[in-house]
Amino acid sequence: AQSVAQPEDQVNVAEGNPLTVKCTYSVSGNPYLFWYVQYPNRGLQFLLKYITGDNLVKGSYGFEAEFNKSQTSFHLKKPSALVSDSALYFCAVAPGGYSTLTFGKGTMLLVSP
Amino acid sequence: DAGVIQSPRHEVTEMGQEVTLRCKPISGHDYLFWYRQTMMRGLELLIYFNNNVPIDDSGMPEDRFSAKMPNASFSTLKIQPSEPRDSAVYFCASSYSGNTIYFGEGSWLTVV
């Protein structure tokens, strides 16, 4: 069975600084990896995904993520954080040829002015 | 596209009452998912359908929960009878041929 670990419950960063939200995964075969963001009282919004190809994936709102097969990681990054990036971020994984996603517990990102 | 549409957005009900949550997936999508989100357990997949057929309901917590998809544009999740521990946010989501899954805004359920 697949699983996702987001080791940090919360990440704090100052506006303008780079941010990283960590994710590691466990799955049989080649993984499909996703990041979603959830703003307060809203549903999950798709940010980006890795299926195959370039290990660096670019997504919405200036976010990117790097797939590292040897470390089984898929960390979310942004070069310069905005206060409006403050939200709950979920990493998710599915085995290749997937139908469903398994989500991590989520990481709260707080960007201070 | 209007996205995945869920109703009601908020529901407060008394223990023992029947609760019905409704979902309209994105037009053309052939997969529909029901997830539940709680502080304690995070996001859990309850059940998913492919072409209106339930494929995996192993996440449905107990017999009090049931889900149906009578056609490609409508699904329901029913809880009968409801209990306080069912209080959660219930998300419906859909995808096309196993591609990116898109979520609705959720139904906030409180059982008192």
Image (cartoon, coloured by chain):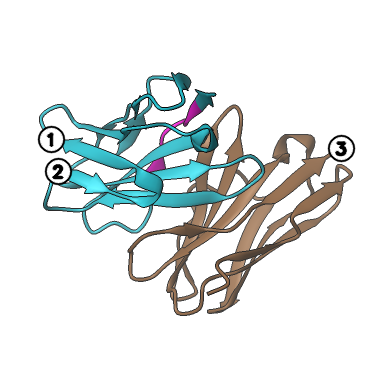
- Give the position of the C terminus of chain B as an image quadrant: top right
Image height of B57 relative to A29, above or below: below
Q: Is residue A101 visible?
A: no
Q: Which residue is mark 1?
A: A69
Chain name for mark 2:
A
Question: Is residue B76 visible to us here?
Answer: yes
Q: Position of residue B29 (x, y in %)?
A: 44, 74
Name the tint of chain B in the rendering: brown
Q: Amino acid at mark 1?
A: Lys
Task: Name the amino acid type tagged 3.
Answer: Val
Q: Residue at x 49, y 74 (%)?
A: B52
The residues bearing labels 2 and 3 have C-alpha atoms spaced at a distance of 48 Å
Q: Is residue A68 above or below residue A33?
A: above
Location of residue B70 (image quadrant): bottom right
Q: Which residue is mark 2?
A: A55
Q: Nearer the viewer, residue B62 or A78?
A: A78
Q: Residue at x 86, y 47 (%)?
A: B13
Left or right: where does residue B26 sit relative to residue A66? right
| Chain letter for the part of the structure drawn in cyan | A
Q: Earlier in the sequence, mark 2 or mark 1?
A: 2
| Mark 3 Cα-neighbour bin, 10 Å: few <14, some 14–19, many ≥20 | some
x, y percent for residue B32: 49, 65
